[in-house]
Amino acid sequence: MDSLPIDTSHPAVRDYLSLIRLQVLTPLSLLINIATVIVCAVVVTPSIGEISKQFPTSISPKPIIIAIYVAAIYAGQLGYCVFIVLARKAETKRTVTKGVGLSLVIANWVMALWAVAWVFQWFLVSTVLQGILLLTLLYSNIVLLIYHQPTSARPFDTMLIHAPLRLFLVLQFGLMFPLSLFINLGLTYTPTTPGPPRDYADHPWPGFGVVLGTNMLGLAVVILRRDIVWCVSATWICISIWVLRPKPGPVYIVAILFTVLHPLALVGTYIYSRFYKRRTVVALPPGDEALYGRTESGRAVDASGQASGPREVDEDTWG
């Protein structure tokens, strides 16, 4: 056959082929990501966690807490892979092909490459890969936010498309990219085994600036968009930072502060939206009294436009 019996230039056919491509490539990339990270975290020596202990920084997290976070990302992506196969709504398919597209596939491949670079202690390569990963996830989340906003009419889209990508983005933005950058720039402490680093009080202000800046931006997102996923993600990362002690005082204080502020801000925005939402008052234009059934003084009118109902009694009425 010289050509396929279908017109591949037709937009509907192109979208269908894009969906089929994502249904194959996304699970494959996720499998490679999970397998690579597990091998680098469990089998290889030194592992991902051991490298982190060898190069402690002012924002280094508790490994087990971040492992739970990454497991949640993988669980969300597994749900996404199943969802894109079972999706039937045209809006959902459009969100997958036009909103997410190949961004998640690229992100999974880059994260797998990062795990390899990390265990080989290629910190410059690791930082570059983290930057690529951050930009990829930022792009896909912006596209989803602008063109395919989450809606209560499609809750599974929110849970299985928007939430996993948002979790992935917050991890790179709030922790992984700054952590890799700190190690590459030499903003580390001298480790001791066992025991805390000897000079953990050195250069606290870069860590303070990163934790404060990323969480201030996250707090703005939580307040403006009432973003539950961002709130939970940022709070979890803050907990992972201050749980691993000792930490410089400024970093420790600001991490605990935002652990409290993120949930409070989310609850406060929901309370404000529920009880203090501004009510709009509609003013009827003059001359439309009969149309809306009321006169300017508030008296009811009948179908002929004549005022009806109770009215004032004057002397002529009494005769």
Image: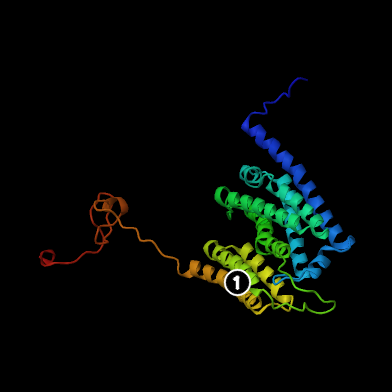
Can you identify the residue that label 1 sits on?
Answer: 263
- Residue 231: where, in percent of width, then height? 62, 66
* Quarter of the image that includes the C terminus: bottom left
Which residue occupies the foreground of this view, 251 or 312? 251
Which residue occupies the foreground of this view, 251 or 222? 251
Q: Would residue 2 be found to the left or right of residue 43 on screen?
A: left
Q: Amino acid at mark 1?
A: Pro
Which residue occupies the foreground of this view, 64 or 175? 175
Q: Would residue 36 be found to the left or right of residue 177 on screen?
A: right
Q: Would residue 211 be found to the left or right of residue 292 on screen?
A: right
- Residue 283: where, in percent of width, then height? 31, 58
* Quarter of the image that includes the N terminus: top right
Please tell me how crowded label 1 is: few (under 14), some (14-19), or many (20+) other residues with Cα within 10 Å: some
Q: Which residue is painted at 72% across and 53% down in the image? A: 129
Q: Is residue 82 above or below residue 316?
A: above
Applied colour scheme: rainbow
Q: Secondary structure at mark 1?
A: helix
Which residue occupies the foreground of this view, 2 or 112? 112
Q: Is residue 297 above or below residue 95?
A: below
- Residue 107: where, in percent of width, then height? 72, 51
